[in-house]
Image: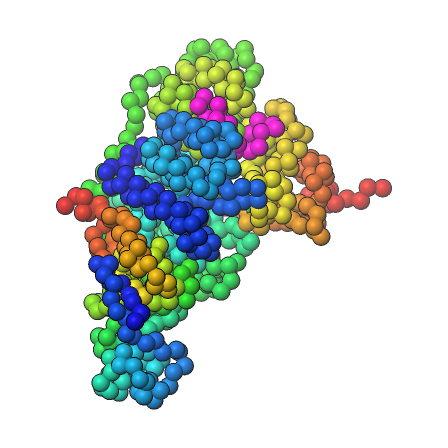
Amino acid sequence: MPKLIDLQGQVLDNPWVLLEKDTAADMAASHESMHLIVPLQLWLSSFESLTGSGKQIAVWLDSDETAGSIADSADKAAFIALNFPGFMDGRAYSTAVALRKHHGFTGEIRAIGDVLRDQLFYMRRCGFSTFDLKDSVKLEDACKGLKDFSTSYTSTTEEPLPLFKRKQA
Amino acid sequence: MYQYDEYDHQMLAERVAQYRDQTRRFLAGELESAQFLPLRLQNGLYIQRLAPMLRVAIPYGCLSAVQLRKLAWISRHFDKGYAHFSTRQNIQFNWPKLEEVPDILEELAKVQMHAIQTSGNCIRNTTTDQFAGVASDELEDSRPWCEIIRQWSTFHPEFAHLPRKFKIAVCGTRKDQAATQVHDIGLYLRKDANGETGFQVLVGGGLGRTPVIGQVIREFLPWQHLLSYLDAIMRIYNLEGRRDNKYKARIKILVKELGIDTFREKVEQEWQHSINGPATLTLDEVSRCKAFFTDPAYEELEDSNKAVQDRLGSDLLFSHWMERNVAAHKKPGYRIVTLCLKATGNAPGDITAEQMEFVADLAEKFSFAELRVTHEQNLVLTDVRLADTPALFDALKQEYLATPYTGLLNDIICCPGGDFCSLANAKSIPIAESIQRRFDNFEVQRKIGNITLNISGCMNACGHHHVGNIGILGVDKKGEEFYQVTLGGSSDHDTSLGKVLGPAFAQDEIPEVISKILDVFEVHRQEGENFIETFRRIGMDPFKERVYAKVD
Ligand code: SF4
């Protein structure tokens, strides 16, 4: 089974199946997997019926889809996955921050797509909680990326007080 | 000067270790080139035409003698015994080996230096006026604010993968020597009616392919909110800046496409989420940062000196140097001395290891062991006693560092160009040299007066040619190197962008073209005018006519 890692650097089983953007509602309903990550459009049009189907349903946002678009129904999802179409596309960092800070989302945010070890620390600081790495070999090794730094200067989602306030405390 | 605390040291050590491992994985084939690329860029390493180039940050231009000596040592051990000051208060090594860069970074860390975020699509080194803290016309010292921004921007997790690079400048002096208006964000220090500090915030300035002057997004931002407001601008840019076309990815394009009013509204809305939040600055923190930039132990001195006066009367070279390279200081009896790295035949901004060590010694002897680097690619000793200026001058002469051309024609700002840079359309250093040779005479230069001449080897505009009174841009015409000339640029408070004079010229025509331009200036110049003032008064046509006149 595919694997993912969490904030503690534990390697977890990943039973989740990602449905592509144009997937229709009936396709999702009849999908064999009980763990589906559905695209935003499908989620918005059908999350009530999907979540009522006995399956576990999560939603994924592409990098051009906003935190605001999911704000009202975020709590109904098993988790929110944010896609990195390429690791150089940094929009999802801000989307994660917006979900946490502006919309008070406290559930799981998963990084999916072109997720690489060398970006893990910044992702966790922005509020991501699980990481579906692109290359799932050597996951134990990749976990080290979560701990590249012991702290951050600026206010982050994970540690809202900036360093200068923590120092003063 | 700012001194690292345990946290600064620790994070820097962690960064070096991180990059060492990334380099190891790259060399072992565990990291693809494309994945390694932004990692090395955000540690200052480019792959250039001939070799890698390592760009080291000199945060807001402040450098200690100890640091400069370390840079000299690095240039000898890991490079060819020289380095290059860029136009953004950075220093560049042109020949390091990729596999040795982690060692270089480790050496730099020992003197609180690094190459973090000196390249790549992230927030770059914050720049400011080289006279900050000592200028006689200063509203407030910008350095503590620069340090606050340095800490905020360093390893900012949200903004390491922006659509494009991002540059911030801060200016607290009345004469803007930081080219503030052509930065992605420009901050002018201001005081409100109650004397409280704040910032006028400009956004969307920049040079490169599409030069734009920044627009005011906020007239007055109280200092407490500096970081949350910057976060808000950055977040809007990160989410909405274009990522489909590298040439349209800078914030200036987003601001242009949305219009400044719409952009401002978005930022304000975003800001409402974080205003008065955890990022709000405290008086404690600002005071802590300010404490690093207090005055050194100045003596109470007269603002005149008999020996200096005598020397001025008897030594022409000394008087030239005093006139051009020595500026007023806020403290009586002190002067600010510019070391002009523009001796003819010396590539602008280049400095040898010996010169670096020599200057480090002078800084210790004459200027409280600190110096500044400028975006004009010169060095500055900020706190020299007037009485010491003759001794300093004598010393500088030995290492060809007393060239009295500061602010004059030969003080050319020039990018490395085709001799080093793989993006270049044309060489730039030989152009600078050909101009310098032609005009290498103090009387001639003094007569021309204050003028800026900037050269870039391509559209990326590292030589800031758009804001040179005279700008020269290398262009490629069917595989041959040509040079386009612009006139009328300025990077001062009244920033303007140069306009194209006309068809481009071959390399060997340039000195003659410059000469003709200066002739026109001379003919039309009114009493007391400098080049930019005359140009603004008479416009482009007289220059065009003269330069492109048919010879029969
Ligand atoms: S302006 Fe062009 S040629 Fe000059 S350093 Fe920049 S990229 Fe290279």
Which quadrant of the structure image shows residue B218? bottom left
Which quadrant of the structure image shows residue B315? top right
Q: Is residue B468 above or below residue B365?
A: below
Q: Is residue B89 above or below residue A62?
A: above
Residue positioned most to the left: A169
Give x and y (percent) for residue A136.
Answer: 34, 63
Residue at the image point whose x is 71% and y is 52% from the top? B478
**Quarter that holds the N terminus of chain B:** top left
**Quarter that holds the C terminus of chain B:** top right
Give x and y (percent) for residue B490.
Answer: 53, 43
The answer to whether residue A13 is visible is: yes
Residue at the image point whose x is 40% and y is 46% from the top? B24
Residue at the image point whose x is 57% and y is 44% from the top? B49
**In the shown orientation, is residue A158 left or right of residue B437?**
left
Residue positioned most to the right: B552
Q: Is residue B283 magenta?
A: no
Between B434 and B213, which is closer to the camera in this rendering? B434
Q: Is residue B195 above or below residue B73?
A: below
Q: Is residue B353 magenta?
A: yes
Give x and y (percent) for residue B313.
Answer: 53, 12
Residue at the image point whose x is 49% and y is 65% from the top? B244
Give x and y (percent) for residue B544.
Answer: 70, 46
**In the shown orientation, is residue B524 left or right of residue B148?**
right
Between B56 and B125, which is closer to the camera in this rendering? B56
Between B252 and A144, which is closer to the camera in this rendering? A144
- Start-end of magenta stretch: B342-358
Q: Quadrant of ligand 1?
A: top right
Q: Is residue B339 above or below residue A159?
A: above
The answer to whether residue B493 is visible is: no
